[in-house]
Image (tube, rainbow, N blue to C red):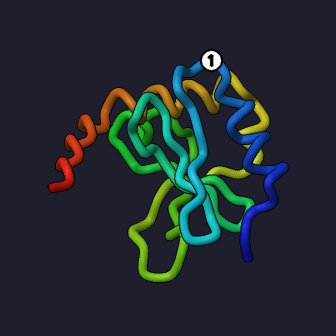
């Protein structure tokens, strides 16, 4: 089941305090990017954030689930995304801990 565009827009809007947040359509679902780094996925109107040590320490109760069959587990967020400050802080911590993306190879 694909995401509703309204839900995707809401998730991105909740992160307005973070620079360069966008959702890119991927195979009917969405990748969630912040500051050029993929921080999570939006699948079936649920938000999955990449697990990091800082994120695990920030979360009071960690719920992990794979965003799709065969995927590695991620932090599954529920009503927490309603709190824009809390959600933004989790994403900020995740961005800071993730490595810089590899430069894309130039096409010949």
Q: Nearer the viewer, residue 3 or 103?
A: 103
Seen as rendered, the residue at the extreme bottom is: 69
Q: Say what secondary structure mark 1 lies in.
A: loop
Tell me: residue 25, above or below residue 14: below
The x and y percentages for residue 44 are 71, 67
Tell me: residue 32, above or below residue 91.
below
Say whether residue 43 is left or right of residue 65.
right
Quadrant of the image containing the C terminus: bottom left
Q: How many marks?
A: 1
Q: Residues within 10 Å of mark 1 (few under 14, many from 20)?
A: few
Task: Please tell me which residue lies in front, 106 or 24.
Answer: 106
Q: Can residue 62 be seen in this view?
A: no
Q: Mark 1 points at which residue?
A: 17
Q: Is residue 90 above or below residue 73?
A: above
| Residue at position x 60%, y 46% in the image | 23
Quadrant containing the N terminus is: bottom right
User: Is residue 14 visible to the viewer in this orientation of the structure?
Assistant: yes
Q: Which residue is drawn at 50% across and 82% down?
A: 69
In percent of width and height, residue 60 lies at 56, 39
Left or right, 18 with respect to 104, comes to right
Kindly identify the residue that appears in the image at 63 percent across and 32 percent down: 87
Please tell me in which quadrant of the rendered image residue 43 appears.
bottom right
Residue plotted at (31% across, 38% down): 98
Q: In the orientation shown, which residue stands out farthest toward the front? A: 108
List the single residue furthest toward the right. Answer: 6
Q: Where is residue 48 in the image (x, y as percent from the top left)?
A: 56, 55
Location of residue 92 in the rendering, given as x and y in whole percent from the top left corner? 47, 26
Q: From the viewer's side, name the closer residue of 11 and 65.
A: 11
């Amino acid at each position: 089941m694909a995401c509703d565009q309204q839900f995707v827009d809401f998730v991105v809007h909740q992160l307005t305090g973070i620079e360069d947040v966008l959702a890119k359509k991927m195979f009917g679902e969405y990748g969630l990017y912040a500051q050029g780094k993929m921080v999570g996925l939006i699948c079936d109107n649920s938000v999955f954030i990449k697990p990091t040590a800082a994120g695990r320490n920030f979360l009071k109760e960690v719920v992990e689930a794979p965003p799709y069959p065969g995927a590695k587990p991620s932090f599954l967020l529920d009503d927490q995304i309603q709190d824009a400050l809390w959600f933004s802080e989790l994403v900020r911590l995740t961005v800071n801990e993730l490595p810089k993306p590899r430069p894309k190879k130039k096409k010949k």
